[in-house]
Amino acid sequence: MLQQVTANKSEARSDKHVVGRMSQHLRRLESESITIFREVAAEFRKPVVLYSIGKDSSVLLHLAMKAFSPGRLPFPLLHVNTTWKFREMITFRDERARALGVDLIVHINEEGVAQGINPFASGSALHTDVMKTQALRQALDKYGYDAAIGGARRDEERSRAKERIFSHRSAMHRWDSKNQRPELWHVFNTSLAPGESMRVFPLSNWTEMDVWDYIAAENIPIVPLYFAAPRPVVTRDGTLIMVDDERMPLNPGEQPEMEWVRFRTLGCYPLTGAIRSRASTLPAIIDEMRSSRTSERQGRLIDSDAAGSMEKKKEQGYF
Amino acid sequence: METVLLHEQSELVYDAPALRFITCGSVDDGKSTLVGRLLYDSKLLLDDQLDTLKAESKIHGTTGGNIDFALLLDGLQAEREQGITIDVAYRFFATERRRFIVADTPGHEQYTRNMATAASNAELAIVLVDARKGVITQTLRHSYILSLFGVRHIVLAINKMDLVGWSSDRFQSIVDDYCDMASRIGIPDVTCIPICARDGDNIFTRSKTMPWYVGPTIVEHLENVEVLSELENLPFRLPVQWVNRPNADFRGFSGRVANGVVRQGHSIASFPSGRVSKIARILTADGEAEVATEGQAITIVLTDEIDVSRGDVLAPTDAAPIVADEISGHIVWFDDSAMIPGRRYTLKCAGRKIGAVVSRLKHRVNVNTLDQQAATSLSMNEIGHVTINLEGALVCDPYTKNRETGGFILIDTINNRTVAAGVIETARRHAVDVRWQNLNVDGARRAMIKHQRPCVLWFTGLVGSGRSTIANLVEQRLCDLGRHTYLLDSHNLRHGLNRDLDFSTEARVESVRRTAIVAKLLYDAGLITLVAMLSPLRVDRQMARDLIGDGDFIEVHVATPLEECERRDPGGLYQRARTGDLPNFTGIDAPYEPPLSPEISIDTSGQTPEAVADRIVAYLQEHRYL
């Protein structure tokens, strides 16, 4: 019934997503985010943007470029590569960095690679811990960043809904969720003791829908995997997994099949569920989103390891 | 069901910014339940979230296995386990008429700072009251903070009406109580609604059990309330956040327009300098523009090369902000350790950070009676009226005129915690009349003719540690070496400079402050200055260090253990303290915070004072002070 309504109305609504037209709602969010970027540039010694290549990172990078225009982005991008990202993500990452003329630093946990950590044999929890959480901490320590800007949003998950925009981390990268600094008006307490750092979330007040509306309004490039296309997938525990390269071990009798799918979030391909979809344009994606009955994190296998697992991971230094 | 998804909204509503509101009130008044209801009834809960909620309601729920909406908001493990809200949760929902960002705030007094965090950015607040309990202290405290932070639209939601038999009399008596108090603290607009959040009465749909209530439901009110900003009509303010200077041809001043409207060609001045220029270009997020208004993040290019840096404010000359070195207003104290006048903090306001000393606590507000009480300190969650002296010029406005240039926080200089938030009510510039006279002879010249490098040796340690004896011997040795010195011993200062001060915590803070300032003067005179003072607290010694400057401040911890000091017991003081004869005695019933990284630390046990003094002189020689 709902699908029907959506389809009938899509024609009349399409003019809302024309490039260059933006609602007052998005303008306010945009201004707030730009203000946050500038505060980071003014207050920290060595900031970095954590770039994860997904749609939120695309918006983050777009806002960062605006914040410092006509100047250059005054800090580099850091991509923590687990070596299991979709190949299209890596291609997109390098193209964007080149096109925008920004510095891109890629960090891989080489110890983890040497130990043969991977999502299949090691399981998603260990893989995520070693190749994402530990890797991020390694990179932050190696380069001595005192502020790491990320694209997390409060509507993603309920422990994120509790987090400050400027979120303090101890010298051990820990988040003390029960004792966060008060954060009043737009006056951010950016003071740090030696070794401590700040995680900064300019998209805190954005929703997933806002991100899509903004991408449409500003015509921001995103990884093609967000658009529906025929892709080789297998079904595991009810989740559609794309076979992105030959490293994926197939079970006996398992045969990848071409299906029309797209991704709502992007991460390590063995841990990211696809959804069946024919939405191959932005307006079609936005329509599909509006009638969705599941949250975007449902497709992320790492979040379902244990109740409260995001909070636990964050306390240990996960983004 | 009346609610529909976003896509059926009218164009106009689709365009408007989200209404930002909070829910507040005491523990168990039903804040989280109300927000859970709003999300549930607006169909914003998605299937997988609902499944998780149902499963968790069975484990942690307080509603006998039915859906416990509070669990939806309590996103931290500790909150779900203890069944309380610790910190703010921000959630998003929309009806067919409006978008909303709601902040669900904690009710416990202990977490008032988190409620204040959410209130500072809210346009509207729903104050919940349990119909059985009526208006209680926490209702008043939260309402006072709302008033202080200028939240103009208040909804009083009287919840759990089912438990008072849906009584209109009970409703009316709570309304009368609340409105009486609201008018006294300057809340202009209160909308009172009787609800039952658990069952949804008067949330989205009208209650069938309370036909006597004819006003709007919660959602009707939220959809229709006008929160149009008056800020555009106030004079233009741009606190400069960041100077954008990519190359020699471009120099722009970036910030968010805090008030008013700015146009190309307008005359503008930069404060505190007061230098005047004109707007050459305005760059917005959408490129070059002729006009920019309140809330926009912009970059301004001026026609002249005037000096502007972060923390300065661009404003019109005919409606200038205040350039102040003293501000007064109310603060809410957040920290476990009490606020004591005389302490030094870092004040942050509109991008400027300045050293600040709370010079006076005029009164504390009793939130129950709204009385002003005399007080010497503020404990956690207390509200007081203070005067703050600033070490530099702050460009500001009264908070009622501008939230961005009128709201400030205080940061602890040692542990970096945000210890207070405040609103500026009045601001003055003292130094206009008492101008700093520039002198032709400076500290360096005075030191040069004495052929020495001045510094401050700060001896701290317990009673009986030997700090006075050792400081005395060190000064003697320095004089023997032909150095110009002066020793400030706290015992001697009590006969003059500090005669009016007793041994209370407040008086100790003040005595350290005075002594540090005198030490600074002697240092500036070119002397090697020795201070022998118990000075038990880190924050006070840090203040002295900041005042002198890191390189020339030598903290000497005379680290004799308490047992040894007590064995020596000069004047029998410890014995008197142990019998309760001398209350507030450092090391016994008052804390001593040893330095974390002193330049010199010496335990005098088993050493002669002469040997210790020799070691200190050796340190000064090694580090080229002599």
Image (tube, rainbow, N blue to C red):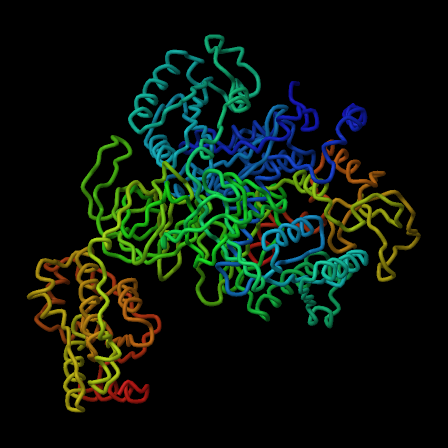
In front of the other: B503 or B63 = B503
Quadrant housing the N terminus of chain B: top right
Q: Residue at x 20, y 85 (%)?
A: B450
Quadrant housing the C terminus of chain B: bottom left
Q: Is residue A175 left or right of residue B170?
A: right
Q: Residue at x 65, y 34 (%)?
A: B50
Q: Residue at x 26, y 52 (%)?
A: B358
In the rendering, at what x and y percent does residue B23 appear? 47, 32
Of all residues, the one furthest to the left in this rendering is B495
Q: Is residue A312 left or right of residue A250?
A: left
Q: Quadrant of residue B526?
A: bottom left
In the rendering, at what x and y percent does residue B575 appear? 12, 66
In front of the other: B416 or B534 = B416
In the rendering, at what x and y percent does residue B567 appear? 16, 75
- Decide: is B274 above or below B330: below
Q: Quadrant of residue A297?
A: top right
Q: Residue at x 67, y 65 (%)?
A: A103
In front of the other: B13 or A190 = B13
Q: Is residue B594 left or right of residue B309?
A: left
- Decide: is B211 above or below A315: above
Of all residues, the one furthest to the bottom in this rendering is B481
In the rendering, at what x and y percent does residue B28 appear? 44, 31
